[in-house]
Amino acid sequence: MAQFTRRGFSVSALASAAALASCSKFSFSDRSLESQTDQKNLLLFVIDDLNDWITAIGDYPQVKAPNIRALAASGTVFANAHAQAPICGPSRASLFSGLYPAQTGIYGQISDDQLDPAISAVSPTLLLPQYLRSHGYYTAGRGKVSHQGGQEGMFEEYHPRLPENGDYGPKPDQRFKWESDKTHTDWGAWPDTDEKMIDHITARWGVDFLQQDRADPFMLALGFVRPHVPWYVPQRWLNMFPLDEIKLPLVRANDLEDVPAAGRNLAAVPQMPTLEWAQQNEEWRPILQSYLASIAFVDHCVGMVIEGLQDSKYADSTMVCLLSDNGYHLGEKQRFAKMSLWQRSTRVPLIFSGPGIETKVINDPVGLIDIYPTVTEMLGLPSNQENAGRSLAPLLTGAGTLPIQPQVSVYGKGNYAVIDDRYRYIRYADGSEELYDHKSDPMEWHNIAAENGMESVKKRLQNLIPQNPRADVMKPQ
Ligand SMILES: [Ca+2]
C-alpha cells in the first residue's frame, strides 16, 4: 500500500514499484522524490478487447504483460471495473461522452459521423478531448480511440490507422484458420516484423510526440488494436507461449443449461468459433497462444511509450490512464467473443498512474463512465456537469472514500447487467434473469436467480436498470 505524501511517492512505495518493474522498462525509480504532484498532462492508452486476465486484475497465470504490470504496480488498479457496453462502439461512445448508452441511445457499433448527432440530441456536453481542448489543452490522438478512430473534430491532431493496413491489419492474402466475412477472427504468425504492425507505428508516433516541446498541457490518446481479432502477431511473440505449456481456462461443459434462452441467443455469435469447434479441431490452444501473444505484443507497445514518457520532460507532470473497452471470452461459456453480459465480457483493466496517485488495488465496482470526471478533477479542471459518472479522484489520491456504486452495462437495447461488490444481476429484454454470487461462484457457473432468498438482492439491483432508456439511434423507431 502506498504511503503517499503530498510531496510524492514514499521511498518504500518507490522501492516496491521498482521491484515489480524490474522485469520491464518502466520504473519510477529515476523520479525525484521532490517531484511535483500536480497532474498536468494526460496520456491515455485505449486498448481493444484486452480482457481481465492481466496481472493485478485477473488470475490467468500465463499472461506476459510486464509493462502493464509495472504500470499497475506504480498506481491505482481498479480490479472490478466494467465497460458500460461489452462492445467497442457503445463502450467508447459512453467513455468519451461521459453519458450512459441508455441516455444517448448508442447501443451498437455506431460510426464516428453518427456520434455527434446522437450525443448532441440529448446533451450539450463535449467529448473528453474536446472538453480538455476548451480548457487550453493540446489534444492529439492516433489509432483506434473512438470506434473507428477519432471522429471529425474529436482531436486537434489525429492520425488514423494506416489505410494500407486496413482496420486491424496487416493481413495475409489468405486467412490461416477461420473463414467468415462477418468477423476479422483468425490467428497465426503475421507479419514478419513488429515495425509493420499498426500498434507499433502508433507507439513510435507517441514516443516522438512526447519528445516535442509544448507550450500547452496536452492529452495524448493512443488507441491500440491488439488483442482485437485477427490475432496476428509476428512469430517471436507466439514463440513466448509454447502450445504444450498452455493451460486451458476453466470451463464447465453444461454452463449454459441454467442460462435463459434470451441469454443464450444474445450471446450466440455464429460467425465466431465455438468451444466445441475449437476442441474438435484442436485449435483451442493455438487460439489461446495467439491471444496471449497479442497481449504480450501490445504490452510491448505500451512499454515503448512509457519509456518515452520517462525519458521526456513530461515524466513528472503526466497522468497515465490505461483501459480496455471490453473483455473477451476465450472458451468460457462455450464461446470466443465479447458481446455478452457476463463477467468475462464486461470486466476490463483500468489503471491510473502518475505523481500524486497512490499505489493500491480498489475492489469496489467502478465504470469506464467514471474516467471523464476523474480526469477533469485530477487535472484540476472544472467538472463537466453533464457527466453521468463520478470522479474516482478521492480514491486515487487517498483523499477520501466513495460509497459502493453498482455498475450498469447494456448489450442491445433492453438487456442489462448490474454489478455490485458481490453479485451480478442480468435481466434480458424479455424479463428473464440471471444472478451470480461472486463470493461463492467467481466463474458465474450457477445461476441462482430462481433460488429462494434472492428476491431482495434482485430487487435492489433491478432498481438500477434505467426506467426510460432512449430509443436505439441506429434503429429508427
Ligand atoms: Ca473492443
Image (cartoon, helix red, strand yellow):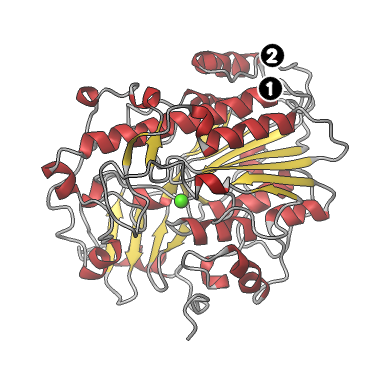
Q: Which residue is mark 2?
A: 30
Mark 2 or 1 closer to N-term? 2
Asked whether residue 68 is in view, the answer is no
Q: Residue furthest front?
A: 173
Residue 293: mark: none
Residue 310: mark: 1
Q: Is residue 236 left or right of residue 69?
A: left
Query: How many numbered badges does the structure rendering display?
Result: 2
Residue 71 placement: quadrant: top right
Residue type of the residue flagged with mark 2? Asp
**Where residue 36 sits in the image (x, y, percent)?**
79, 26
Give the foreground label among 2 and 1.
1
**Which residue is at the front of the view, 406 or 300?**
300
Residue 255 against residue 396 in the figure, above or below? below
Does the residue tagged 1 have its C-beta within 8 Å of any atom of ligand 1?
Answer: no
Quarter containing the N terminus: top right
**Label 2 CA crowd tier, 10 Å (few <14, some 14–19, many 20+):** few
Q: Residue furthest right?
A: 215
| Mark 1 residue element | helix
Rendered residue at 78%/37% (across/down): 40
**Where residue 450 sits in the image (x, y, percent)?**
21, 66
In three-dimensional space, the C-alpha distance between marks 2 and 1, rounded to whole angstroms, equals 8 Å
Q: Is residue 334 left or right of residue 81?
A: left
Residue 248 against residue 423 in the figure, above or below? above
Residue 411 placement: quadrant: bottom left
**Where residue 275 sits in the image (x, y, percent)?**
19, 48
> Do the residues under discs 2 and 1 have CB atoms within 8 angstroms?
yes
Rendered residue at 48%/64% (across/down): 109
Rendered residue at 53%/29% (across/down): 195
Asked whether residue 342 is in view, the answer is yes
Residue type of the residue flagged with mark 1? Gln
